[in-house]
Image (spheres, grey):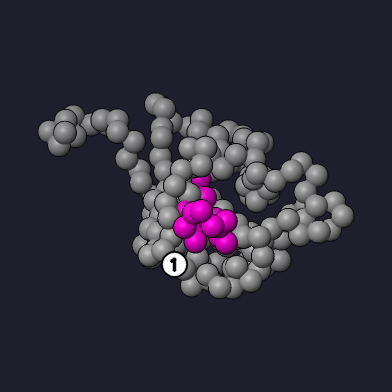
Amino acid sequence: MRANPTSSLQGDRSWRCYRPCNLHIVLQPLFGWIETNVRGVPTFVVPAPPAPPDVIVHAGAIVGSPDDESRWRVDRARADLPPDARVEVTAESSLATHQGWPILAAHCTASDPSGAVIEQRIVAYYNFLHLVAVVLVRAQTSEAFTAHRGAIDQIIRSAQPDFRDGAVLALSELWQL
């Protein structure tokens, strides 16, 4: 299986599965954060509209582990950026969700070819057994990250996989419908 080369956070859903799958990651927003949906991607923003958001959190789909994980990570860090933009990873840290799932959090700076900063990012990569997911946190300034750092950390650590996709896998599940 190959990672989807596009920058979409939804990723390639054609991982090795006997039927179409629609798995997703669940995040818990905090008080004051507004949940919305941007192009089919669950998104949280602060502050509430109509003010322009300081911080935006996008939750990607759960997909099969890519063959080239480093390329997949770069593609996800570049999501929704212009083609000529550069992304520099400034720091990485290993974390865990509240349920114990491993997270690799990469702090990134996105800049244009002249070196002007476009935005600051935290890209959280999750491993759920043989599946992976990504959550992208975006802010225009590092001050916005600093102001909301505690809430961002709580949201990133609140992630949990939702392995249900509505399909019946066994006869025993028919009795639960």
The reply, left or right, for residue 121 in relation to residue 23 is right
At horizontal 43% and vertical 55% (from top left) the residue drawn is: 34
Q: Residue at x 54, y 57 (%)?
A: 51
The magenta span reads 44-60
Give the percent coordinates (x, y) of residue 89: 71, 61
Residue 49 forms part of the magenta stretch? yes
For the point 34% across and 36% down, which residue is it?
A: 165
**Residue 56 lies in the magenta stretch:** yes
Residue 3 image point, x, y percent: 61, 37
* Type of amino acid under label 1: Gln
Pick whichever, 68 or 89, lies toward us: 89
Task: Locate the C terminus by quadrant.
Answer: top left
The image quarter containing residue 109 is bottom right
Identify which residue, 39 or 91, lies in the foreground. Answer: 39
Q: Report how many numbered discs are placed on residues in the image.
A: 1
- Residue under numbered circle 1: 154
Q: Is residue 57 above or below residue 169?
A: below
Q: Which quadrant is the N terminus positioned in?
A: top right
